[in-house]
Image (cartoon, coloured by chain):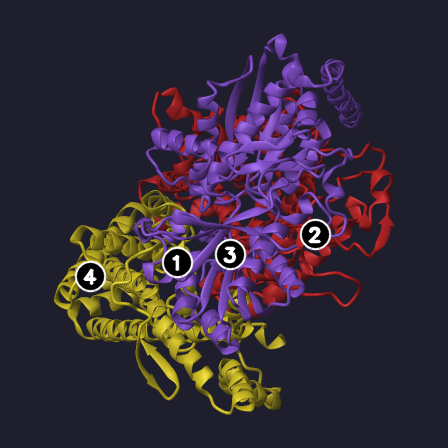
């Protein structure tokens, strides 16, 4: 939760956002301070503590959420099947960096222990690239049938693709591939273990020291942030936002709808693939059970809760929800009833608490925790209540 | 996919392609919908010389699908009026099943209860389930959706998810994590008759007998009554409706009440029909109902019914021919195809969204 | 600076772990000096050890896992939290999350790492799901903590027999040493037991369905293998979509295949009740069989929301537990369980949980002072021989498997609960 504290320490009035409400210099200082803190954080924690593991997962979700935000937040295409790219990214690791294809003995850019194992073993950087390419293609394929659709029809078609991919992940163990003794996936049995990440000039990562994992995923977050912010401020980014605001008007102003939308799907998917590949390596498994519809909803909740379209809001939302799910409910709240002398297990209420928190936060801050500046203006205009002073300020 | 470039501005330059595209969009859909039944029909004829296995699949599919239809109607009603994907609807339906089964216990309805007691008891259960789910739905709207009416469009989606988690937890605490068998009050799988090789079971009769009148009543209500007209007006344009003196808040509450009541009725029928209930049934049903509503054309009642029935049939055919584990993929594959051929759904109307 | 410190740390940490292991080595030498550890009981062993369980406490399997935790706690309470002179502390960890509603890889790995970090930890009871164990085994293996699963039956976790995948089980053991054991027989045994029983009941064509989980799919595969060996026809093996509303389509397919017996390889929570109802209705004369995943009162007893009596009459199932009332240990357990939890007919998973903890306690006691170290405990665990338990008499073989091969055949008794019928000697 440490990451959340800076936001609390700036008790901005209700409708100020990190981007909009603070003077540029203060924003930069805050960002640098946060970044330094994030880099140094693992030194304060035990190298194999659960908390550090939760941080790693939270950062992986940040990447996921940033990717989904490109599709939903920037381009306004409601995607309920984002889990598909988690799956494709993860299977890139399962296929190209594990012992899954037992009859193959392919080694690319790896050394040490894995050279003794059967299967295809490829360096993580190459796998990452493969995951991005596969996901971008997947994103475009899923995007194509939605091009003529609007609004919630897009939602159901993406949801459908997410479910189709899940079903293929679950039943892929029955689909024999045309070469060797190989299937498409390992179904619910899961591909376990997968290769631990090897990077040039660094020792191999292990499950017993989480700090390298943390710094790697943090670096990926920084790269993703850079890419996403640059894209948002580019010509393409403006085209996305134009489509989101009014598709017909955008088209008549010369924005190429097909290309622009497909770019959004491809970029969002590729970013999801990065996170998927990282998570598969870190979690050491590619299991069909991971790719449920609820995962898509979980990531969507992060970006809406954080503030749709707002990069910092999305980062914050992802960290917050991820910690609620993997730390607050299972680790912190679990001991509460006992310490109050009550005889019941809070784990029975896990679902409910999670749902209640979503509900409460959304009702209290409908525009998200750190809303996008542009959206904020729209909102205050739309509502037309006494809060219009903020229009001037923002 | 070049044709999809811009809002429909058919270019006069390619008439030949247009005719082809028109043919495809007109008949392609039928071809897609009929592909599975025709394929397996031919296969049955070749292998066994009669169509009764396929007919059985279709009949059971329609009977299963009528429950989906009932849930989908509630889904599409709510969508039509506030354009919200109400993820909590499926959970509401689940609560309907749980309330019904709980009430049987309280009323002492068992396999030994006589026909008169059974009918009276079930009628009472139906009323209680409908009232409970209806008021629950109204409450959900008040707590989770109304405060967000002027919020960004996706915010209520998250409160809907939040509520569905809460209701799932209620179900989990109520009956535990495993599916729970409930008394098979109607002896649902007893055979009533065999018509041209189709085994008709009591469950099928129940599903069809309850669903059809309920749906007809609902459609009549919405098309004919004052309140129904107010609902349609609000769905088309809330602001204009308000100017016409329609109380929009009341109308929305009413819509949720009706949607919830249908979910409650579906809950009871589901419990009688399947005789197994569990906390996760609503999630699955909600997903299917959502699919059915979209397939039929979201916001369109008849479309939702049609979508539900079609999905029921696809599921049965897939379950018995292809394999139950592939069924969701087949259903969703169908949905994608329908969307490709008819982006507005099978009998879609122009909603605010699509218009 | 960022890179350098990262590299430095990466080197430092394995050193730390080795250090931990080195501490343990001292204990090991102590154990070696007293070859038959129980003899060391003269000088009462003292100290304190920690035991953990890691199970999915949220979502659909919570009933079984709660039963398991009840069993574990009961065993500990009976022993007054003591194993010989050693104080045993127990903590129940959750390997599921609210969002997933089932086991979650991050939680599993976190739990395993948490235990790996605890210097006093000697034993880890878990996981419930075989897929999850595949994740925690390698982590615990690297630090030499003994793992006892009360529920995993997937063949490949311990052996490379048919039914396993290539590379199993070696790929789970980075150190090459065995640290994983289980007290439930692997699927091979139960598959053979079910086939033997069906054959002796006169089945000719058996329809199989499975729930696509690791347990169900694996068991179904082994039923197919064993049926082939014993010349029994399997008409089809269908994976089902566990959350489907009903399985009438599956049942009508079985009917068209002319099956005269049916077995569902899966657990109650994955559509077990519904599929038996639908198959029973479509095939009114077929005999119905089930594995231990459905051999529990929550499935068989209509009062407890199980299958109706009419289906129950046609149903038989197999469990590794034999007749609890027939021997003293079993009677004691039943009495204690009903006193503690007011439940006369414990869930089989409660029994497995109970036995897992009893095994831990007895192993610590038998190892004496060495039982307070990871190495000493692990060595003693794999020495388990002819142990009398609530599950019957068994040993732990060199793979970490239990040697139990007898399966109890159960029918549905007049009270609706599973009733012990006879013992099946599986023809393997």
Q: Quick one: SS at disc 3?
A: loop
Query: How far separated are the C-alphas under marks 3 and 1?
Result: 11 Å
Badge 4 is on which residue? B112
Q: Nearer the viewer, residue A354 or B3?
A: A354
Work out which quarter of the rendered image holds the C terminus of chain C and state it. bottom right
Q: Position of residue B215 (x, y in %)?
A: 26, 72
Q: Is residue A172 visible?
A: no
Q: The chain drawn purple is chain what?
A: C
Badge 3 is on which residue? A80
Subunit ID for the residue under disc 3? A
Q: Nearer the viewer, residue B96 or B226?
A: B96
Q: What is the tally of numbered marks visible in this picture?
A: 4
- Same chain for mark 3 and mark 1? The answer is no
- Same chain for mark 2 and mark 1? The answer is no
Question: Image point 55% across, 71% down: which residue?
Answer: C204
Colour representing chain B: yellow
Q: Earlier in the sequence, mark 4 or mark 1?
A: 1
Q: Quadrant for residue B267, please give it.
A: bottom left
Q: The chain drawn red is chain what?
A: A
- Image disc number at residue C58: none
């Amino acid at each position: 939760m440490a990451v959340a504290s800076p936001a609390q320490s700036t008790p901005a009035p209700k409708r100020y956002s990190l981007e909009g409400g603070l003077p540029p210099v203060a924003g930069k200082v805050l960002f640098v301070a946060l970044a330094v803190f994030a880099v140094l954080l693992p030194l304060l924690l035990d190298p194999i503590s659960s908390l550090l593991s939760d941080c790693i997962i939270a950062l992986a979700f940040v990447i996921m959420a940033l990717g989904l935000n490109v599709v939903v937040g920037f381009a306004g295409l409601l995607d309920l099947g984002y889990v598909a790219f988690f799956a494709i990214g993860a299977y890139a690791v399962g296929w190209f960096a594990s012992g899954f294809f037992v009859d193959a003995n392919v080694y690319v850019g790896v050394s040490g222990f894995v050279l003794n194992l059967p299967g295809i073993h490829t360096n993580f950087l190459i796998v990452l690239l493969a995951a991005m390419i596969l996901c971008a293609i997947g994103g475009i394929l899923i995007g194509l049938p939605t091009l003529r659709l609007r609004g919630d029809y897009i939602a159901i078609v993406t949801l459908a693709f997410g479910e189709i991919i899940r079903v293929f992940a679950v039943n892929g163990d029955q689909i024999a591939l045309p070469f060797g003794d190989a299937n498409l996936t390992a179904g619910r049995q899961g591909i376990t273990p997968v290769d631990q990440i090897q990077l040039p000039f660094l020792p191999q990562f292990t499950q017993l020291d989480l700090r390298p994992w943390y710094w790697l995923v943090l670096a990926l977050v920084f790269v993703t942030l850079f890419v996403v912010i640059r894209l948002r401020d580019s010509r393409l980014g403006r085209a996305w936002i134009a489509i989101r605001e009014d598709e017909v008007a955008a088209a008549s102003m010369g924005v190429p709808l097909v290309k622009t939308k497909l770019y959004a799907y491809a970029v969002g998917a590729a970013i999801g693939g990065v996170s998927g590949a990282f998570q598969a390596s870190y979690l050491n498994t590619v299991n069909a059970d991971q790719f449920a519809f609820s995962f898509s909803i979980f990531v969507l909740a992060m970006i809406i809760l954080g503030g749709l379209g707002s990069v910092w809001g999305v980062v914050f939302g992802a960290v917050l929800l991820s910690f609620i799910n993997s730390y607050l409910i299972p680790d912190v709240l679990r001991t509460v009833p006992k310490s109050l002398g009550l005889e019941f297990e809070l784990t029975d209420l896990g679902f409910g608490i999670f749902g209640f928190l979503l509900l409460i936060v959304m009702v209290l801050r409908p525009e998200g925790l750190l809303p996008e500046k542009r959206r904020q203006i729209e909102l205050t205009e739309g509502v037309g209540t006494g809060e219009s002073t903020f229009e001037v300020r923002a | 996919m070049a044709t999809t470039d811009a809002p429909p501005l058919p270019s006069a330059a390619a008439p030949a392609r247009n005719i082809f595209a028109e043919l495809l969009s007109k008949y392609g859909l039928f071809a897609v919908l009929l592909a599975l039944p025709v394929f397996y029909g031919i296969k049955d004829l070749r292998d066994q010389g009669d169509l009764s296995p396929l007919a059985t699949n279709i009949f059971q599919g329609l009977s299963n699908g009528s429950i989906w239809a009932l849930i989908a109607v509630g889904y599409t009603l709510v969508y039509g009026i506030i354009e919200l994907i109400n993820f909590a609807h499926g959970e509401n339906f689940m609560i309907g099943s749980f309330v019904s089964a709980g009430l049987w216990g309280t009323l002492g309805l068992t396999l030994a209860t006589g026909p008169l007691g059974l009918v009276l008891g079930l009628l009472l259960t139906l009323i209680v389930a409908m009232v409970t789910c209806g008021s629950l739905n109204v409450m959900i709207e008040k707590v989770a959706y109304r405060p967000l009416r002027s919020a960004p469009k996706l915010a209520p989606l998250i409160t809907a998810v939040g509520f569905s988690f809460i209701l799932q937890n209620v179900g989990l605490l109520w009956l535990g994590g495993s599916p729970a068998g409930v008394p098979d009050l109607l002896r649902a799988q007893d055979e009533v008759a065999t018509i041209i090789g189709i085994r008709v079971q009591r469950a099928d009769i129940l599903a069809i007998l309850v669903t059809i009148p309920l749906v007809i009543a609902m459609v009549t209500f919405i098309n004919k009554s004052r309140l129904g007209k107010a609902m349609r007006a609000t769905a088309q344009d809330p602001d204009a409706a308000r100017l016409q003196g329609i109380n929009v808040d009341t109308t929305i509450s009413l819509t949720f009440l009706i949607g919830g009541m249908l979910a409650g009725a579906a809950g009871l029928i589901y419990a009688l029909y399947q005789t197994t209930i569990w906390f996760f049934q609503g999630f699955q049903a909600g997903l299917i109902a959502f699919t059915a509503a979209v397939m039929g054309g979201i916001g369109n009642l008849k479309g939702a019914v049609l979508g539900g029935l079609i999905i029921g049939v696809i599921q049965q055919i897939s379950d018995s021919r292809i394999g139950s584990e592939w069924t969701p993929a087949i259903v969703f594959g169908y949905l994608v195809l329908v969307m490709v051929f008819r982006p507005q759904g099978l009998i879609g109307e122009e909603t605010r969204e699509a218009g | 600076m960022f890179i350098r410190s990262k590299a430095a740390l990466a080197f430092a940490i394995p050193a730390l772990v080795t250090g931990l292991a080195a501490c343990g080595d001292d204990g090991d030498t102590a154990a070696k000096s007293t070859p038959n550890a129980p003899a060391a009981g003269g000088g009462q062993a003292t100290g304190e050890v920690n035991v953990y369980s890691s199970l999915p406490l949220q979502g659909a399997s919570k009933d079984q896992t709660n039963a398991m935790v009840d069993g574990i706690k009961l065993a500990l309470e009976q022993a007054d939290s003591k194993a010989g002179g050693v104080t045993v502390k127990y903590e129940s960890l959750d390997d599921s999350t609210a969002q997933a509603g089932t086991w979650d890889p991050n939680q599993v790995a976190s739990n395993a790492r948490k235990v790996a970090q605890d210097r006093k930890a000697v034993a880890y009871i878990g996981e419930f799901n075989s897929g999850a164990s595949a994740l925690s085994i390698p982590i615990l293996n690297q630090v030499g903590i003994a793992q006892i699963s009360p529920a995993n039956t997937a063949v490949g976790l311990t052996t490379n027999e048919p039914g396993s995948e290539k590379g199993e089980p070696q790929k789970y053991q980075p150190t090459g040493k065995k640290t994983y054991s289980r007290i439930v027989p692997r699927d091979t045994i139960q598959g053979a037991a079910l086939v033997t029983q069906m054959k002796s009941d006169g089945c000719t064509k058996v329809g199989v369905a499975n729930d696509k989980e690791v347990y169900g799919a694996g068991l179904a595969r082994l039923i197919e293998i064993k049926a082939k060996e014993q010349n029994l026809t399997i008409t089809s093996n269908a994976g089902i979509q566990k959350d489907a509303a009903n399985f009438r389509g599956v049942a009508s397919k079985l009917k068209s295949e002319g099956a005269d017996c049916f077995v569902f390889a899966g657990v109650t929570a994955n559509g077990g009740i519904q599929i038996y109802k639908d198959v029973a209705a479509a095939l009114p004369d077929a005999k119905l069989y089930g594995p231990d995943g459905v051999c529990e009162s929550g499935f068989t007893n209509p009062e407890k929301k199980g299958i109706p009596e009419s289906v129950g009459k046609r149903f038989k199932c197999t469990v590794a537990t034999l007749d609890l009332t027939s021997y003293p240990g079993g009677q004691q357990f039943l009495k204690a369980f009903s006193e503690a939890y007011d439940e006369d007919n414990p869930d089989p998973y409660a029994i497995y949980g109970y036995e897992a903890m009893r095994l831990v306690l007895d192993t610590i006691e038998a190892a004496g002072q060495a039982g307070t170290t990871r190495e000493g405990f692990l060595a003693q665990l794999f020495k388990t021989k002819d142990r009398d338990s609530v599950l019957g008499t068994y040993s732990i073989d060199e793979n970490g498997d239990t040697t139990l091969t007898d399966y109890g055949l159960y029918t549905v008794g007049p009270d609706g609960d599973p009733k012990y019928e006879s013992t099946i000697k599986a023809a393997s």
